[in-house]
Every structure is written in C-alpha cells, then in structure tokens.
Image (tube, rainbow, N blue to C red):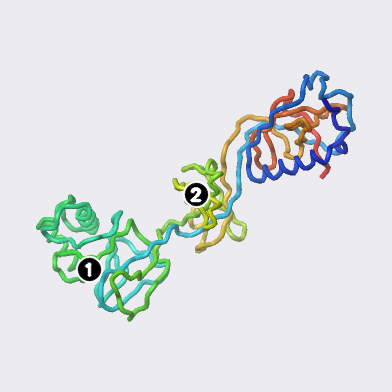
Amino acid sequence: MREPPAGRRGRSAMNRRALLAAGAAVALGVVGAAALALGGDPTAGGAATAGGAATPPAATATVVRGDLVDTVTVSGTLGYGERSPVVNAASGTLTALPAEGAVIRRGEELYEVDRDPVVLMYAPKPMHRSLAYGVSDGADVRHLESNLRALGHKVKVDDHFDLATRAAVRAWQDDTGLPATGEVTRAQVVFLPGEVRVQEVRADVGAAARPGQATLTVTGTERIVTVALDAGRRNLADEGAPAEVELPGGAKVQGEISEVGAVAETGEDGEGATVDVRIALGDPDEAGDLDHAPVSVELRGQTRRDVLSVPVEALLALREGGYGVEVVEGGSVRLVPVTAGVFASGRVEVSGGGLRQGVKVGVPAS
C-alpha cells in the first residue's frame, strides 16, 4: 500500500488527470460509485494512514449532512408547442385571412373562401368526409354533434346523423352565414384538437384557394418550453416534476414537466438520440410575449435525503482506484477512502471512512 500524500503537492499527474475526468463527469450530472482498493482500517492507523501526520492542506471545507438533488441544465425553446398546418378543402378565392398571433376558438372563422367562412370545430382527428342525413354512423358524426351542442344547438350526441342533427346543422349554418343545406362539408369545417394560435399565414388574400393547400400554420395556445433531451438523461425528466426556466435576460420562471416523449429520435448523422420534453410554465404571463426564444432549463433528477456531502474539489482520485478525502483533525491529516454518490450543485455525496457531519476536509486554496 502507498503512503498518504504529503499535503497536496504529493498528488501524482495521474491523480490530477483522474480528478479532471471526475470533474467532467460532475458537469454532466453523472452519479459515480467507486469501489475502494485500500486495505486495512484507515480510521485505526491502518495502511492508508501509515506515516503519521501530513502537511495540512491550504484550505478546508466542512462535511455537511442534508438533502442532495442531482440536477442538469439543458437548452430549450420557449413557444407554443408543436406546429400544425391547416389544410384547405375549398375551391375559390381567399377573401379573408387571420392575423398572425390571433387565437381562434370553436365556432370561429379560420379564414374565408368566396366570402364563405371556414370554421374551426374541435375533434381529435381531421374531418375526412361530408356529413349529411343518411351517412353511415361514425365517430366524426359524434364529434360534429358535440360541437353543435357546445355552440348552443339542441342535438343528441351519438354516432348517428338523424333528422334532428340535420335541423341543428341548418340552424348552425344560418347563424354562421353559410348556405343552410343541412350538410357539412370539408370546405366548411376544419377539425382540430382545440383552440389554436395562428403561427404563420401561408397565403395571401386574393390568391386562389386550392384543395390540399396549407393556408395557415397553427399551434396550441399554451406557453410551453420544449427540450430535446439527450436520451441518456431520460431519468431526469418525469411528468409532474418541477423545472426552472431561465428566460433571455436572466429572469427565472418555475415550471412543471407536462409531457415526456416515449420514442427517442436520432439526428441526421445517426447519433445524438433525444426525447422531447415539454414544460408548462406556472405563470405564463412572466414569459411576456417571447416566442421561439432560447431558454435554459434546470431539470431535477435523483434526490438523496439526509446524506453527507463535501465539495467536489475535496475528492482525491486514489492510485489504487476509487476516491478519498483528506480529513483534518487538530494538527493531523489522514487520507480516508470514500464511496462517491450523487453529484449536485458543486457537491458530492460521500460515505465510509467514519466520516461525520462537521468534520473538516482538505480542499484547494481558492
């Protein structure tokens, strides 16, 4: 077994390189566990302490007991979430378009073709056929009837388009300014999951409206932060977990992870698999009018409660493998092997070697 280092000048170049590697691991939020290779009982004058007192280190820090939270800071984008095209099915001339940033809700006009409105209704899937009396039963009929009822029309919500449904459709068409035919076509209604915000207008008033043309790009209306998280750090993102968002300018906003992608996506070069993480802001108004803005996000991972920790720079990489710390008691210094746990906020969980709260350990001079 080797003698303990005579102060900090006794560390080998190999130890310094190992410490640098450990520091890099800390920056990545890695949880390390080192197996001890030292023999004997270091607290009872065994091989690790042979040679007696060493030169006291230049500075010391205190072993602290408390909670330690593994965190990582990643880049994200503040905006309104995923973008979706609004695909037109009407033929004619575009006679009205919304302003970018406009919020459109159920029953309101998305845009206008030949002065007839194309109206938003809520449904989980796009409308794929015209709906009229005698059409076969289906979920799309139910979605139409649900919207008609929400807009104040008396109708039974089921999968069947009956005469009462036709009457409700005619009443809605009359209120909306559409020909009261009793038939709803894809040129009149667009099914989307909910209210939308116009992200981009992709056509001009007066241009020809063609079926299959994307006239608008829309998003949801909720302010969210999207993070493409390295798949290897997936353990840091759990739905419902807190997250802190730093906005451009330095202001910080509290948020909560609302959704974590189930499938990792690989970059074009075949490397860098990521999962999408979405974070809802606790107070969206704190983000102001920022859209598609770069932000920093602090994610919290594993929490270790009531553990001992020391500053990361107190760790020594041992020639025999694993880590140790220099314990300073009175005028003596002894090298104590430890097991490293969670790294967080510049500290590392340590155990073993008879460590206790309040003990002084050596650190480099600041």
Would residue 258 be found to the left or right of residue 65 on screen? left
Query: Residue 42: percent from the left, percent from the top?
Result: 79, 22
Disc 2 to disc 1, C-alpha distance: 43 Å
- Vertical comparison of 93 with 333: above or below: below
Residue, disc 2: 275
Residue 283 shows in this picture = yes
- Find residue 213 and report its image quarter: bottom left
Residue occupying image coordinates x 34% and y 74%: 97
- Find residue 110 and report its image quarter: bottom left
**Kind of residue indicated by mark 1:** Thr
Please identify the quadrant where the C terminus is shown: top right
Instruction: For mark 1, give the secondary structure.
Output: helix
Using the image as rendered, state which of residue 93 and residue 257 is in the foreground: 93
Query: Residue 200: percent from the left, percent from the top?
Result: 42, 69
Q: Earlier in the sequence, mark 2 or mark 1?
A: 1
Using the image as rendered, state which of residue 63 and residue 5 is in the foreground: 5
Residue 193: image tag: none
Rate crowding at label 1 as few (under 14), some (14 to 19) or many (20 or more) other CA atoms within 10 Å: some
Q: Nearer the viewer, mark 2 or mark 1?
A: 2
Residue, disc 1: 176
Using the image as rendered, state which of residue 183 and residue 88 is in the foreground: 88
- Vertical comparison of 197 with 318: above or below: below
Query: Residue 244: percent from the left, percent from the top?
Result: 56, 49
**Kind of residue indicated by mark 2:** Val
Please identify the quadrant where the N terminus is shown: top right
Residue occupying image coordinates x 28% and y 79%: 93
Would residue 282 be found to the left or right of residue 309 on screen? left
Using the image as rendered, state which of residue 313 and residue 266 is in the foreground: 266
Residue 258 shows in this picture = no
Query: Residue 75: percent from the left, percent from the top?
Result: 57, 54
